[in-house]
Image (spheres, grey):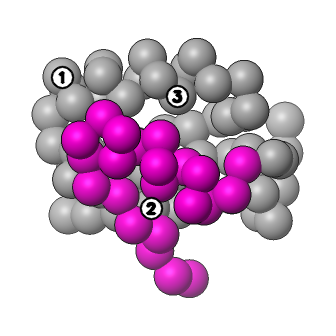
Amino acid sequence: METNFDHLFIFGTNLQTEKDKQVISKILNANIEIERWNIDLEDIDSVLRIESQTLTAEQIIKIITEQDFKCSELSE
């Protein structure tokens, strides 16, 4: 499946551990509007990439911050 960059969102987060990733994983995997996602815990910004045809950046930020994590969209 090819990535449609028009629907790819990139965020900086404060996710740092595998436990953090497990918490967010449950939420993101349960959301049927999220096609694919990944997080780079080794990156200084803990970069989270989400592909969704229907969600907005604001909606994704809300999903993450509701779990008490920080999340902000990174500019290109």
First along the sequence among labels 2 and 3: 2
Disc 1 crowd, CA 10 A, few/some/many (<14, 14-19, 20+):
few
Figure check: 24 above or below 37: above
**Which residue is at a point 57% across and 61% down the rendered structure image?**
58
First along the sequence among labels 1 and 2: 2
Residue 10 among those drawn in magenta:
no
Secondary structure, mark 3, is: helix
Q: Is residue 23 left or right of residue 3?
A: left
Give the residue number, with chain letter if any, for mark 3.
28
The amino acid at mark 3 is Leu
Tell me the number on the disc at residue 19.
1
Figure check: 7 above or below 68: below
Secondary structure, mark 1, is: helix
Tell me the number on the disc at residue 53.
none
**Which residue is at a point 59% across and 51% down the rendered structure image?**
59
The residue nearer to you, when weighing 70 against 21, is 70
Q: Is residue 20 left or right of residue 64?
A: left
Residue 69 among those drawn in magenta:
yes
* Percent position of residue 22, x then y: 30, 20
* Percent position of residue 66, x then y: 36, 40
First along the sequence among labels 3 and 1: 1
User: Which image quarter holds the C terminus?
Assistant: bottom right
Tell me the number on the disc at residue 11.
2
Secondary structure, mark 2, is: strand
Disc 3 crowd, CA 10 A, few/some/many (<14, 14-19, 20+):
many
For the question of whether residue 2 can be seen, the reply is yes
In the image, which residues are magenta? 55-76
Q: CA distance from mark 2 to mark 3?
A: 14 Å
The amino acid at mark 1 is Lys
